[in-house]
Image (spheres, rainbow, N blue to C red):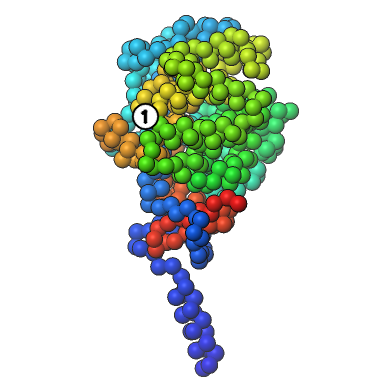
Amino acid sequence: MRYFSYSVLLIGLALSSCQKPEPNTLQNPDLLYAKYEPKESDLPISRADYKNKLEGFWLGQCIANWTGLVTEMDKVGNIGEIKTGDFYTREDWGKPDIPNIFSGDKISQWSPTLDFVLEDEGGVWGADDDTDIEYIYQELLLKNKTSLLSGEQIRDGWLKHIKKEEENFLWVSNQKALDLMNEGLVPPATGAPENNPEYEMIDAQLTTEVFGFYAPSRPDVAMKLSLLPIQTVARDDAQLISEFNVIMYSLAASIDESKPISENIKWMAEEARKHLPNETYSAKMYDFVKSQYEAGKTWEEARDAVYERYQVNQEDGYDMTSRNMYCNACFAAGINFAASIVSLYYGEGDLKETIKIGALSGWDSDNPTATWGGLIGFMIGKEGVEKAFGRKFADKFNIHRTRVGFPNNGIDSFPNMAKKGIYVIDRVVQEELGGGIDLQKDLWYIPTPK
C-alpha cells in the first residue's frame, strides 16, 4: 500500500512539472519537450509568428521561382557558342518573352510576357528545383528525428525521392551527385572535386538556404546544420556562397523590426559578407556590386559591369570563360551570385521590385530570384506577401511535379509545410542550441552564442 502511494506521488509530481500548452499550440509528436528555465540573455521568439513567416517563405519563394522561370537562360551574354544579345532592362518588363538557350524558337510556357507568374486561390503551386530539394531535406529531418542529417540519410532520401532518369529536374552538380550516389558514393564524397567536376556550379545555393531558418538568429548553428547538405554538391566558392545565403536566412530572425526592411537587408548582407574570405572571388563580387550600388549606378549598369568584369575580363580570379564550358558556365555559382547581389541591393527589401530585378538580370534567373523572394517572404510573412500583391494566393504545393514517393499523391500545403518547419526547429532549439520551448507561451528561448 505504501508502495502504491509512493508511486502515485511520483506520477503526480511528474505531471505537475509537465507543460500544459494551449489547445492550438503545435507539438512535435516525436520530441520529448524538456523543462527549461529561460535566461535573461535568451532571445524569445514567437512560434506562431514564425509559422506565419515560414508560410511567407514558401509562398514568396514560389512566386519568385515561377516568375524567374520565364526569363531563365534567356540572356547569358555573347561569349562562346551561344550568343543571346543585350541583357534585359526595366523597359522590357511586360514585353513579350524571348526563347531561352534550350527552347529553340519557343517562348516560355509559363507566361508569354515578362511578368509575375501567380497561382490563384484554389490552385496548386508546382515544385521546381528551387523548392523541391529543400522540401526533401525537411522531410528527412522529420523522418529521421534528427537535426543533423548523415551522408547515408541524404543519399537514401535522394535515391527514394528523385527519379534516376530525366526528366528529373536536376542539373549540373546535383545531377552528378545523384549519379555518384547510384554508383555507391555517399555525401560529402558526392561533392568533392575529385569526384564531381561540377562542384563550382550553382546547385547548393538553391537547395540549402532553408537550414538558416532552422537555427533562428544563430548562423553558427545554421552552418553546422547545412554543412553536409551543401557539401553534397559544392566546394570552395560555391560552398561559401551557399553559406552566405544560409547566414542571411538565419539572421532574418534577429532583425530590428523598428527599422526599414532595406536597412535590415543590408545589415544581414554585411554580416554574411564577413564569412567570405577577402581573397575569394565571391567576396570580391559582393564588394564590387555593393560599390556599384553605393556609386549611384542603376541596376542595369551594375549588372552590365558584372558581365564585363567577370565574364569578359575574368577579373578577381573568376576564370570560367577560359574553360570554354557550355553557355559560358551560365549555371556557375559565381556569376549568378553576383547577379543575386544586384537584385538584393537594388531591390531594397521590396518584394516585387527584388523579384522583378532578379528575373531581368540574366543567366539562371529563377534561382537567385527564388532565394531572395523566399527570404523577403519570410521577413514580411504570408500576409505581407499578399499585401505586396494586393491579393490572395493558392496555398497548395505539388512536390510530385518534380519529385516522387511522398504521401497524398504529393499534394501538401504551405501551412502544413510551415508546421513541419516548426517541428524541426523545436528539436534544433532543444538539442543543438541548448535552448528551450515554452508550450504554454508558445515561445522559443534562443541562447546567445558564447
The mark total stands at: 1
Q: Residue at x 40, y 58 (%)?
A: 442
Q: Position of residue 251 (x, y in %)?
A: 49, 41
Report whether residue 396 is seen: no
Q: Residue at x 46, y 7 (%)?
A: 86
Asked if residue 396 lies left or right of residue 334, the reply is left
Q: Residue at x 44, y 67 (%)?
A: 19
Q: Residue at x 60, y 39 (%)?
A: 229
Q: Position of residue 295 (x, y in %)?
A: 47, 17
Q: Position of residue 329 (x, y in %)?
A: 59, 16
Q: Is residue 140 above or below residue 97?
A: below
**Which residue is nearer to you in this view: 100 or 290?**
290
Q: Is residue 191 above or below residue 428?
A: above
Q: Position of residue 326 (x, y in %)?
A: 60, 14
Indicate the secondary structure of the residue bearing disc 1. loop
Q: Classify 10 Å Cα crowding around label 1: few (below 14), some (14-19), many (20 and above).
A: some
- Determine which residue is flagged by label 1: 350
